[in-house]
Amino acid sequence: MAYDLLVIGSGAAGLSLALRVLAAKPNARVAVLAKGPLSEGSTMYAQGGIAAVLDAADSTDSHLADTLNAGAGLCNVESVRFVVENARAAIDWLIGQGVVFDREDGAYHLTREGGHSHRRVIHSADATGRAVQTGLMARLRESGADIFEHHNAVDLIRERLAGGRLGRCVGAYALDRSTGSVVALDARAVVLASGGASRVYLYSSNPDGSTGDGIAMAWRAGCRVGNMEFSQFHPTCLYHPRAKSFLISEAVRGEGGKLLRPDGTRFMDEYDPRGELAPRDIVARAIDDVMKRLGCESVYLDISHKPADFIVAHFPTLYAECLKYGIDMTKEPIPVVPAAHYTCGGVLTDRTGHTDVENLYAIGEVSCTGLHGANRLASNSLLECLVFGAAAAEDIAGRLANIPPPPVIAAWDESWVTDSDEEVVVAHNWDELRRFMWDYVGIVRSTKRLERAKHRVKLLLSEIEEYYGSFRVTSDLLELRNLAMVAELIVRSALQRRESRGLHYTIDYPTPDSIAPVQNTILVPKNFSVRRQS
């Protein structure tokens, strides 16, 4: 199975890139790998919208300033400018693909979210991700691309050069979950669009597949990663024993929702003058503090003071979901808690999405582009997928003809392994990992807790690698292996940052370092080598 382009991941980043490459190179052989159904990724669950300057009263300079402010001094200014200046073109492209956004009085309706100084979030009701995902999926199925659903990427493949050196990326091994066999997919160019790693935590708003696969594979392949200590916790996930981490959109606060203690009193103004519209890291820490001080299991988000028709029209998905659990958000507050939501760090890339390994790209949440810095501004995530997806697609389309075909890839060797009779080990390790990450590497950290996590993850990694080398791979084992690797990267990064900044808050260093220059946390793998520039 030889391809010009292999895309690992089927969200907004991967689908938009694949469609753009096929538009530029209609005869290119393109394969898209999806871990589950094509629809099952974080994009499908994105509620709020996409940030873009679409109003005459707004400006790209204002969008840039808001992004830099949220990023707490660690954003790359040029990367931010590149994204905000290309935001409108990204929205226009989506509209051209058939994605429909809400209108009001003839114009697109824009909402405002935490950290934004203007209304600039274009949306499709409260299910923007679903509108984007379904629109792009329909176009991809018509495009002629080969779609591999229910395939887990196992590892990237690099060309072997003289002297045992590793060269360009030439494909990937993937587990066909329907047959249990591992197949080799070779390609001139490979794109990681596999999303983030928030399932490393016990409580997360992400779907089950957000297990850091691309970050772990890129690290093993020799790519540097950056700023992994910055895990964003969404302040408001529905708290209910039968609800599986359902996200309550930032837009509820943007439209006037208030956060309340169990006694009905507001508290956000005591933590930040912007109140409920403060950036997510501040709101999440405030909720965490209130819950710990009062010993309560949740706080409450109340928008019931708005007209019922307004709430149902603007938040139909949230309204219906809450009703499933006996909560009528038009009449009563919603119980909410923070949950791991977004990985701000990832695989280091340049402006075209190219990683340290030749012909390997990373776009979307898997990447570290300099856009988010120490904290992502609300609704910049889908925007990043689209803008860097377009940039990478242009680079790939322009280079494909000059990339030589990959060499013959060796078949996956299972001659030394057997079927496991100890699946309970995987389930136990999975649970242990997510629990100690939540307890020791969560919203508020300390050096002592991080050292404990470092020790625990080291033992887990050793146990997992022994298991991985002895038994045939399964989806659960692959995800556990990747999550443990990402957990180690997060802990190592957090221990290196001896200050509190953005999403990284430690009680041992509770303030930002005002003396030393602000630095990104860059981790370098043992097999790192500088990519040959094309």
Image (spheres, grey):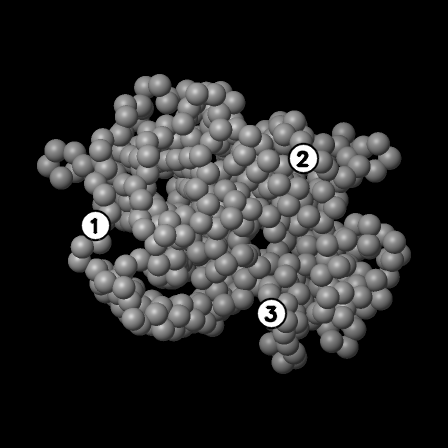
Q: Residue at x 31, y 23 (%)?
A: 403
Q: Which mark is residue 288?
A: 3
| Image quadrant in which the C terminus is located | top left
Q: Position of residue 209 (x, y in %)?
A: 48, 55
Mark 2–mark 1 Cα distance, whole angstroms, equals 44 Å
What amino acid is found at the position of numbered circle 3 in the picture? Asp
Q: Are marks 2 and 3 in contact (CB under 8 Å)?
A: no
| Image height of 187 relative to 241, above or below | above
What amino acid is found at the position of numbered circle 2 in the picture? Val
Q: Position of residue 173 (x, y in %)?
A: 31, 45
What amino acid is found at the position of numbered circle 1 in the picture? Asp
**Which badge, 1 or 3, is on the more N-terminal residue?**
3
Q: Secondary structure at mark 1?
A: loop
| Image height of 274 relative to 106, above or below | below
Q: Which mark is residue 413?
A: 1
| Image quadrant in which the N terminus is located | top left
Q: Pick the residue in front: 201 or 210.
A: 210
Q: Which residue is mark 2?
A: 99
Q: Position of residue 500 (x, y in %)?
A: 49, 60
Q: Secondary structure at mark 3?
A: helix
Relative to 441, 124 lies left or right: right
